[in-house]
Image (tube, helix red, strand yellow):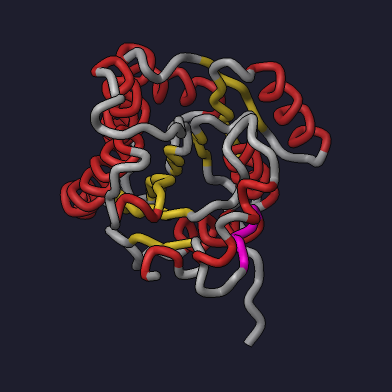
Amino acid sequence: MTIQRPDLTGRTALITGAARRIGRHLAGALAAAGVRTVIHANRSRQEGETLAAEIAAAGGRAELVGGDLTDPAVAENLIATAARAFGPLDILVNNASLFAPGDPLETTFAEWRRFQAIHADAPFLLSREFAKQAPAGRDAVIVNLNDWRAGRPGADHFAYTLSKLALHGLTQSLALAFGPRGIRVNELALGAVLPPAGEEAGYLRTLREEIPTRRFPTLADVAAALLFLVSTPSINGETIHVDGGRHGA
């Protein structure tokens, strides 16, 4: 049996934080599968415009929307803004993220709230508004980008990990709440795919021995997992770890 790349022609997606890094690759993968793609960016709008132009040059359709998702008013209105480009959305990818170390004694309340705003508040508001406008009778899907740390919270990335733990709970709860409405909610729990912004590739080399496969997940791995979740109607409330087994090590 030959497994072919899914044809998602006619679908419409919003991907948050899609101008750079993993989000950029996910937006490109969806566009290559025929999805009309709405790219969200905050401080990387120039990169977002470049990506939209690249998708259009390849024969796809893409639009750019902006906004700071730490502002709940922006998050609450972003679905309606995105839907003005191509009509109602049936795919939402909550990818926008922050990453930084910090232990409980060092973490300020402002830092705590910023992580919660990006990883919990915004996905909640976006998912709620997405569910309100999702076309009836369609296989609508939300995919949250999470971290393997959400399953094994530690103290070294305290505010980040706890906010991702909240995102995991949100995924599980919304899968139950939205399933009867024809909306599936799943998540990808990633390992170290790219070094944190501003750090050298040596960051990854220090982690290789902690991965059972001794292999880092790639951008292509993450994109393949996203397309699998989007195109498989029977999967709901699932966490797929794309981390080489690190979550169980």
Of 193 and 41, nearer the camera is: 193
Identify the residue at horizontal 36%, vertical 39% (top origin): 157
- The answer to whether 107 is drawn above or below residue 174 in the figure is above
- Residue 214 at x, y = what percent? 59, 70
Q: Quadrant of the N terminus?
A: bottom right
Identify the residue at horizontal 68%, vertical 34% (top origin): 61
Query: Looking at the image, which residue sits at the far right?
Result: 57
- The answer to whether 10 is drawn above or below residue 222 in the figure is above
Query: Looking at the image, which residue sits at the far front?
Result: 105
- The answer to whether 183 is drawn above or below residue 107 in the figure is below
Magenta residues, as a range? 215-219
Does residue 35 show up? no
Q: Is 217 a magenta residue?
A: yes
Of 242 and 56, nearer the camera is: 242
- The answer to whether 242 is drawn above or below residue 57 in the figure is below
Q: Quadrant of the C terminus?
A: bottom left
Q: Is 62 a magenta residue?
A: no
Does residue 61 show up? yes
Residue 193 left/right relative to 185: right
- Residue 110 at x, y = what percent? 29, 15
